Image (tube, grey):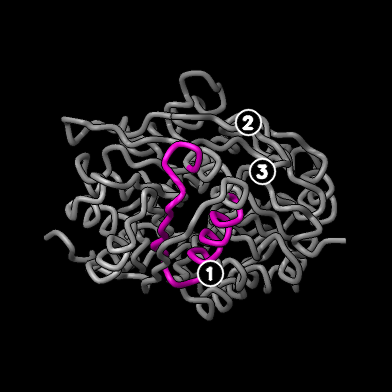
Amino acid sequence: MPGTAPRPLRLTRRHALAAGLGVAALPLPFVRARAAEAPIRIGYGVPLSSPYAQEALEMVRGAQAAVSLFNDAGGLHGRKAELLVRDFRLNARVATAGTLELLKDGVDFMSGGLSPGVMLAINRVTRTHDVIFNAISQSDQIVAAPAFGPTTFHEGPTPHMSSRVLGDYAYPQYGHRVAFLAVNYAVGQELVRGLKAAGAKYGIKPVAEEYHPIGTSDFTPYLRRIAAAKPTLVFFCNYGPDQQFSVQQASWAGFKKTAKLAVPVISMTARLAAGSDAYEGVIGATGYYWTLEDHIPSANRFNRRFREMNEGRIPTDYAALGYAGPMAMLQGTIHAGSIETKKVIAAMEAMTYDIYKGPEHYRSCDHQAVQAMYVVESRFTVDAADRNVFRIAKSYPASDSMLATCAAEGHH
């Protein structure tokens, strides 16, 4: 039913096995002894019971593809990797407890997240215990003081990066009267702040700024106030079902007749759920789109393995990030020839790597992945099974200039 939020997905042991997560993805009743030849264990905390459940499952599928490719290539001198998945439920307390449990289970590295609060909770634990954490969702805080530490890496784009590329693309084309509809927690606030900063040189005029709780299904009051402000450009700074329903309802309300709709973290999952009509012409920023396989060999390699493991399914943006977080750390172990924390940190700081979309590197001051970004526009598709839902409108090569300055993040 339009405007009705989906029920959160509860991951039981049966569901995990059916989804192919494996027994290792569930809490173990004992602490496993660690030997030199034991598998490299990657803890992976994602919100499988949350409004973002579908995105979380995509992340897990991506991470499984990373482990599969690493192991098939021989691992680290024959030492294979394994993935331990936990449901952190978009809850910082659950994330803290779950990370401690994973450390007791002997994980060597951590990845995952999908909300700033959860990522920061994971990071606090891993910093204390000298375990590398490669975060894969949007957050400005994770790479800034005081959250950042030597073991902190961030493979996902930051809100600053997503806002920068989309703002630079949209502001010159779609006018200066700008409205923001944002989820009322850290990532929404960071996206709005980034879009305002990106718009300063274009002389934008913010005319409306509305914040909604996560899990909202009826956006009518927010959209009514935005419409009254007569914007020419409306940014939807939210994700998952929030993005799906807000874009749908704005489209039904006729917003496209007078304004361009833009999404700084555009979700392929939300686009598929909302349908072609609702998203047609909507622009957004993303770090990955599957058609990169046509000209980037590493994207082709990742997509092929993902399809093989998931009955032909095409990877979404967050499936790709779910893959990249663990794979970058595993590449770090190969460069280091070791899983020792200090050696892997040094290797990751020094390496240029190409694992799914061309060359990347980690900036030294904050361990933020410097990577290519893309502005996409949603296509009209006749067939609901058609997964070529976006066209890449503009590509932005990897550049430190996309990132907030080290000084602005509190690094000296």
What kind of residue is marked 2?
Pro
The residue identified by callout 3 is 402
* Farthest right residue in view: 412
Residue 352 location in percent, x, y?
A: 75, 34
Quadrant location of residue 168? top right
Q: Nearer the viewer, residue 277 or 76?
A: 277
Query: Which residue is label 2 attached to?
Result: 397
| Kind of residue at disc 1 | Ala
Q: At label 3, which amino acid type do we have?
A: Met
**Quadrant for the N terminus in the image:** bottom left
In magenta stretch: residue 174: yes
In the image, residue 371 lies at what x, y percent? 64, 38
Question: Which is more N-terminal, label 3 or label 2?
Answer: 2
- What's the distance in space between the residues labelled 1 and 3, CA to CA? 20 Å
* Label 1 or label 3, whichever comes before in sequence order: 1
Q: Of helix, strand and loop, which mostly describes the magenta segment?
A: helix
Q: CA distance from mark 2 to mark 3?
A: 10 Å
Q: Which of the numbered marks, if any, corresponds to residue 186? A: 1
**On the rendered structure, is 397 left or right of 242?**
right
Q: Position of residue 106 (x, y in %)?
A: 65, 65
**Element on which disc 3 rests:** helix
Q: Quadrant of residue 131?
A: bottom right
Give the x, y percent position of residue 68.
Answer: 52, 39
Quick one: label 1, few (<14), some, or many (20+) residues within 10 Å?
some
Residue sitting at x 30%, y 45%: 271
The residue positioned 56% from the left and 63% from the top of the image is 190
- Residue 209, compared with residue 295, is above or below; it is below
Magenta-colored span: 171-198
